[in-house]
Image (cartoon, grey):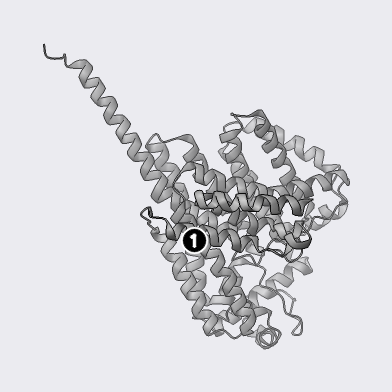
Amino acid sequence: MRDIVLLAVLPLLIYVILQRPFIGLGLWIWTALFNPNGWVYGMAATLRYNLLFAAATIGVYLVSKRKPKVKLGNVGVLVILFFIWTTLSSLFGIGIADVTWDFWGRLTKVLALFLFVILVMEKKLHLDFFLWCLIFSVGFYAGIEGLKYISSGGAHNIEGMAGHVLGDRNELALAMAMLLPICFYLLGEYGKKSWILKFGLLGLIVLVVTAIIGTSSRGGMVALASVGGYLFIKSKRKVLFAILFVCIGSAMIGLIPAEWFSRMDTISNASEDGSFMGRVIAWKLSFILATQHPLFGGGFKALENGIVWYSLSQDFNLYPFFYTGTAVPNPFLSRAAHSIYFQVLGDHGFVGLLIFVSILGLSFVNAGKVAKKTREANGPDWLFNLATMVRLSIFAYAVGGAALSFAYFDMIYALFAIVIVLEYKILPSVIKDQEKREQELLLQQKQQIIPAKP
């Protein structure tokens, strides 16, 4: 039945993309994060929906006569520089060539989405549709898994869809934590207009939090704590927020198994946790890899190459200042970097890491500037709220990603692009409209003061 429905609406989706390319952007990110192929069978499972929607969106933009002026800003320039740098690191990499170029191709697709978000998006409608598509991708999966977790009394183990970009439960938990601020923005915008959307989004927020807990991901919990702490500090209703937190927490305690608390307790005793120390070992080997190849690093996934891992393990004790306690690497069992920062460091060297951190930091800062300038210009609340919530999503990624190999995630680059759209398209338009309204008001006041000539 799902196959029939999807195939039936596919021509309609292509048609609306040809009419409104911003819809194509939303479907582009939706297919990237939802993976419709994993939900259908038969012929419907063989189609490449993400490629189809991306190609339609790009094609419509290229043939369009009206192409608005584009300003990339400092973040856009850095993202392009990062792409160039990753290309060079792939050319000079020491990993398996097929693996390296496969991941280079994946990053290319992610950056294509980044670029076309900047090129196509111009209005609040475009942004909101894109964010709703995030809700119906990551949010939909979180809602389903959250309901399973509740109905099973906490026995259901939440995992990502096998073979998908969010297949790993830790990465899935981080994506859901990043989605929470988006839920709060849409709740503020549409909750006042419809009680169905209000209670639907409130329910989704509860289910997303439940799903994050259900993944038993420590990185996801750290990201969730960062989102919750920020919202509490910024909230004007701290007492109500605290009561809501206590109520949800009390309800969840009955569902959460004892093993979950034991796992979370290892956060405060990280040096005694074998899993965490395994991450520290991977971090140190990533650092050694970058030290030996400081300019371009080892290339995509070089650390996970068994030969490279074994070679780096032989030099493990040459860097005693990078403390790992008594933990030492197994030279015959390679692992991922388990950190967006050490992942980029090992893959693309110190220069690559500097570019990546600059993109992350400037996007966070620029989103804050948009929010501040919106307030100073008496701009609309939605722009202030969106800039603030996107900033919080970036912050959640920066914190939660510290223990995950998730540096090339579609959603974070889309958020980088949204910050650019807010800064160079939406904000100037809002300020211009505000100045125009002020001039009209001033003119009206002068006309009232000065009597008309007889």
Residue 224 in sight from this viewpoint: no
Q: Position of residue 110 (x, y in %)?
A: 56, 64
**Residue closer to the observer: 16 or 97:** 16
Q: Looking at the rendering, which quadrant does residue 299 occupy?
A: bottom right
Q: Position of residue 377 (x, y in %)?
A: 37, 37
Residue drawn at x 48%, y 40% is 384
Identify the element where label 1 is drawn: helix
The residue that label 1 is drawn on is 59
Task: Report the number of numbered marks.
Answer: 1
- Outermost residue, top side: 454
Q: Looking at the rendering, which quadrant does residue 446 occupy?
A: top left
Position above or below: 413 against 377: below
Q: Looking at the rendering, which quadrant does residue 161 occupy?
A: bottom right
Residue 107 in sight from this viewpoint: yes
Image quadrant for the C terminus? Answer: top left
- Amino acid type at image mark 1: Gly
Position above or below: 121 against 187: below
Residue drawn at x 32%, y 30% is 437
Residue drawn at x 59%, y 66% is 408
> Mark 1, residues whose alpha carbon is within 10 Å: few (<14), some, or many (≥20)?
some
Q: Position of residue 206 (x, y in %)?
A: 73, 41
Left/right placement of residue 297 relative to residue 333 reads left
Position above or below: 335 against 224: below
Q: Position of residue 43 (x, y in %)?
A: 75, 62
